Image: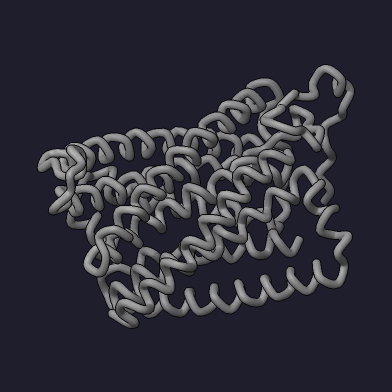
Amino acid sequence: MCSTGTGAVSTLFSVFPYGQHPPPFKMVSTAVFILNFVLFILFFAVSVTRYARYPDLWSLMIRHPVQSLYISTFPMGAITLITFGITVIQGYYGFGGRSFLFTLWVLWWIDVAISALCCWGLIHVM
Amino acid sequence: MSCKRFPHSLSATLYLPVSFRATKHNHPDDEMTSVWLLPVVTLILASSAGGELALALHPYSVTSALTTLAFAAFMVSVGLTLAFMILTIYFHRLILHGFPPCVNIISSFIPLGPMGQAGFSILLIGQSTKEFLPVTGSSSPFLSSTQAGEIVFAVSVCASCFLWALATMWLGYALLGMQHILRRTRIPFKLSFWGMIFPNVSCTRLSFPAGLGDVTIYRVCTQT
């Protein structure tokens, strides 16, 4: 169920790409982003610990017809963080600049790889 | 409150041979829900982030921006096509077995996700193409064309309008399903409710630009 938790994180973020015009929206948006970020790290750590301590669970989970599908919420959660980085941190606050943007770009490539793995891999084992 | 699964009396005939490839799972027809869309939506989501990234990267490096854009276009094509296929199976399930029972009905909102998000992603691709083309010094007839960008933009707006319409259609079915289940049982408030938020948000997000074709609002959306 941990992976479902990560799915929760992914959905959480999306509430706030709306923070558009007024600054308070941006603040709320940023607050939710921080919450999302903390939750993402937390659930990621919990999941890693869980599968590191009980490696058998991993194969059980992959074989579960429904639970396995929820792994794909991990790259989705990560992508919401990246999107926030591009649109608000970089685009609105103007933080970072070139190196920050290229860091996000690298993270995006990693995310693309995991997404592709989810898409091809999970449907393959389905 | 426990959600009892449908009886498997017809299991032998109902086992859907969903042999995308190696089938390590058995999937009874009536247990299929739109949760199957999740692995496919990841690609669409990565694609929409790619569109935003391409716009942001363009001032720094044209090549990186174009590469990102090409990958975004690839991913949204693959993701959307697979999503359509899975939605067909889902539709088949809805007709043969009715709505998913009990709290699983929440998953009927998931189809809004790929439709809305893909529409948004396609719109971003159109916007980026319009900005990037013509690429100076390119020998490719497409990249150096003065009209190609405008055409891709216009086509992408149409495509996202189409997807917006489909998202609205799925919203209709989801609401019908909700009222159908709510009239019969109470839905326990569970973790599955998370599944409702993301699809609805991506659908709403698309509703701003595609519904109106308003480029000003759209620009705000993409923060360019």
Residue A56 percent across, percent down from the top left:
88, 60
Residue A54 percent across, percent down from the top left:
87, 67
Residue B21 can be seen in this image? yes
Q: How is the image coloured?
A: one colour
Q: Residue at x 31, y 37 (%)?
A: B161
Vertical position of residue A71 compared to residue B147: above or below: below
Residue B221 can be seen in this image? no
Vertical position of residue B146 compared to residue A12: above or below: above
Q: Residue at x 87, y 29 (%)?
A: B7
* Side of B67 relative to A77 (left or right): left
Vertical position of residue B66 compared to residue B101: above or below: below
Which residue is at the far left?
Answer: B146
Q: Residue at x 38, y 37 (%)?
A: B163
* Side of A104 relative to B85 (left or right): left
The quadrant the C terminus of chain B occupies is bottom left
Residue toward you, A9 or B137: B137
Quarter-of-image position of residue A89 = bottom left
* Side of B24 relative to A122 (left or right): right
* Side of B212 relative to B16 (left or right): left
Residue toward you, B101 or B216: B216
Q: Residue at x 19, y 48 (%)?
A: B130
Quarter-of-image position of residue B86 = top right
Residue B143 percent across, percent down from the top left:
20, 44
What number of labels is visible?
0
